[in-house]
Image (cartoon, grey):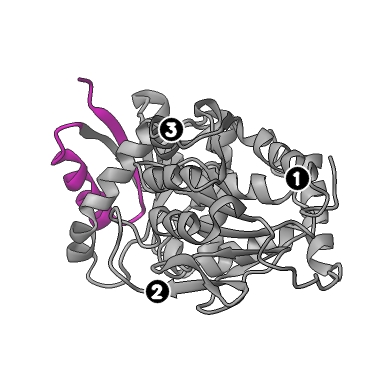
Amino acid sequence: MAKIRVVVVDDSALVRSLLTEIINRQHDMQCVGAASDPLVAREMIRELNPDVITLDVEMPRMDGLEFLSRLMRLRPMPVVMVSTLTEQGADITLRALEMGAVDYVAKPRIGITSGLNELAGDIVDKIRIAAAAHVRRLAPTPAAPGATTQATSAGAAAEAPRAPLPRLSTTEKVICIGASTGGTEAIREVLTPLPADSPAIVITQHMPPGFTTSFAARLDSLCKIRVEEARDGQRILPGHAYIAPGGHHLRIDRSGSNYVAVVEDTEPVNRHRPSVEVLFKSAARVLGPNALGIMLTGMGADGALAMREMKDAGSYNYVQDEASCVVFGMPRMAIQAGAAHEVLPLKQIAPALLNRLASNPALVRHRI
């Protein structure tokens, strides 16, 4: 089997050496080049045609985000961001994912040698995932009219006052979304078309601590619904989306006649915390036929069996199709588990969801 060919791009000679060593220890990958800045990397990519690149953000002559933007417009390829800034500046990470980076790893701020070696398993796992990911070309220019319009719309959404929503009873539907690699942009694609009076939404996206606050704030600025990190004990209301905080599980429970969020720091499930399995199992137990399930792009099988439990309990489930996934792991396993009612391209999930809800005017007043 051909090895995954990797080019490392980082201005630190120590980091380049460590990443090269970590990659070359793997039986299925090889570091074919290491570049100190994006201009050197550009020539290496042309000459070596790697399968994946790892990319730092802070570098001389051209920063990593600018290089990523140019790369994904001109020669799209799988990129894993490896930078201290991906932890300190979650907004930068989200921008990189929006531009087309497959995933990210945060370098330790101190003890770089021991820290990177501790992260070796995570780094090479993400390189393997990236090598099999579907990447797409970025818009031709950063200032494309569509991007300007989107930015204007986002600003308007953030500034426009949003009327308070009625506190409806627990007969309302609750939408449950699970995602991993590629999920930040997939979740945006699902949430932005939803009207302000949509049913409540609960979301588990595999993310470490420190990232979900920025992720929720970004979605809140783009959506008609309100988006926030879930807080333990808070009531789950229509017109709101609640994201599992990084490093914590999110599940649904009942308090009297209300649904409430339970946020807990218990053991990882399927190696993840937050875990989609935890959220979907609680939906099967608590929501039953009041649940609508959505499984989006991601590596592995987290949540697949629990989504089948949701279906058996009466939920109606949508699963993203292979062609539109960055990684078709979690959706594939959900389909194999018999959890899906419909398998759809990403752009068709929100319209299908709204059409289903619109068949009962009591659930949502907006029709499409």
Instruction: Answer with mark 3 or mark 1, whichever residue precedes in sequence.
Output: 1
Q: Which residue is mark 3?
A: 338
* Percent position of residue 212, x then y: 51, 65
Spatial CA span between label 2 and label 3: 29 Å
Q: Earlier in the sequence, mark 2 or mark 3?
A: 2
Amino acid marked by disc 2: Glu
In the rendered image, which quarter is residue 201 located in? bottom right
Residue 250 vs residue 219, the one in the foreground: 250
Q: Residue at x 84, y 40 (%)?
A: 368
In the figure, is residue 164 to the left or right of 226? right
| Image quadrant where one finds the N terminus | top left
Query: Range of the magenta residues?
Result: 1-28
Foreground tag (2 vs 3) = 3
Up-down relation of residue 257 to residue 353 (above or below): below
Residue at left offset 19%, top offset 63%: 113
Provide the residue designation for mark 1.
147
Residue under numbered circle 2: 264
> Callout 3: helix, strand or loop?
loop
